[in-house]
Image (cartoon, rainbow, N blue to C red):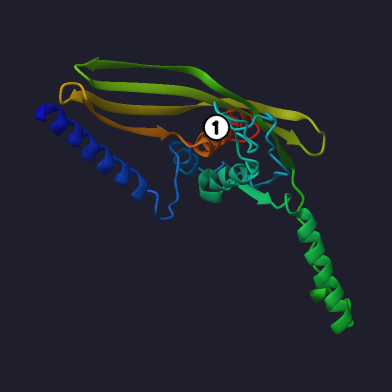
Amino acid sequence: MKNFIIIGMLLILTSCATTQNTVKSGDDPFIEGTPTMQILQSLPPLVEQPVITIAVYKFPDLTGQRKPSTKFSQLSMAVSQGADVWVISALKAVGNGTWFKVVERKGLDSLVKERQLIRSTRELYDGSQEVGNVLKPLVFAGLLVEGGIIGYDANVASGGDGARYFGIGLSEEYRIDQVTVSMRLVAVQTGEVLLTAEATKTIASHKTSADVFRFLDMSTKAFEVETGVATNEPVNYAVRSAIEYCVLELLKLGDKEGLWKIKYF
C-alpha cells in the first residue's frame, strides 16, 4: 500500500517540476529564430546586379478559420492577421540585406500624411520652394510580393497510446494540424506573374499524462493522483517558417529562370 502512495507522490513531484520549468522558460521576452531564416541570411550576394526594389502591400489570411476548440466556438482567428511583417523580415534578411530594398506600402497612408505635413510646415514657416527643401520622391518598386495564408487544416492526424497496471496508468496523445502558404512574385511594369511558390508546415501538439488510483482501508477510501504535461507548437512559428521557405523557393526559382544570378563561392 505504501508503494502506491510513494509512486503517486513521485508522479506529483515530477509533474510539478516539469510544469514549473515549462512556465519559467517563457517568463522573459525572447527572439525566436528559425533554421530557414539562417539560410536566408547566409545566402551569397547577387552577381553584378544592383539591389532589387520590392514592395509588400499585404499578405492576408485567406482561410477564414477560427481557432479550433472541442468545447465552444472561438472568435479568434486560427492564424496571424499580420503575416506581412514576416514577409518583409524574410526579404530584408536575404543575404543580410544585400538582395532587396523593401519599400513601405502597408502604412502608405500614414507615410503620405506625414510627408504632406512636412511639406505644408516648410511652406508655412520657410515660405520658399527651394530645391534643398523639396522632399525627395518616394521610391517605386519593380517587383511586388503577393499571396497569403491559403489553408489551415485542424486535426489532420491524431492518436495516442496508454497502459494501466494495478491502478497505475500512463498515456500519451498527439495531434497534427497544418498550415499552407502561397506566394508569388509579380512584375510591376507588365503585371506578369514571374514566380510562384507554396509551402505547407505541420503543427504538432503532444500530451503526456499519468495517474494512480487505489482503494484503501477495505475499499472504503480511495487514493487518486493525476498529472500531465501538454506541449503545442506555436502556430505563428509554423506560419513564419512556411513564409520563409516560400521566399527561399522564389530565390531558387528566380536563379533558375535567369531573373538574377547568385554568386556561389
Residue at image location 20% in from the left, 23% down from the top? 215
- State whether residue 221 is above or below residue 240: above
Residue at image location 15% in from the left, 26% down from the top? 217
Whole-percent x, y for residue 228 in the image: 32, 32
Residue at image location 51% in from the left, 34% down from the top? 238
Crowding at label 1, few (<14), some or many (≥20) Cα neighbours within 10 Å? many
Q: Secondary structure at mark 1?
A: helix
Which residue is identified by label 1?
242
Q: Report the side of 56 relative to 251 (left or right).
A: right
Whole-percent x, y for residue 192 in the image: 78, 30
- Rendering quarter of residue 214: top left
- State whether residue 206 is above or below residue 22: above
- Which amino acid type is shown beneath numbered disc 1? Ala
Q: Report the side of 139 relative to 86 (left or right).
A: right
Whole-percent x, y for residue 178 in the image: 54, 25
Whole-percent x, y for residue 122 in the image: 83, 78
In front of the other: 92 or 142? 92
- On-image quarter of the C terminus: top left
In front of the other: 78 or 47? 78
- The answer to whether residue 17 is seen in the rendering is yes
- State whether residue 93 is above or below residue 5: below
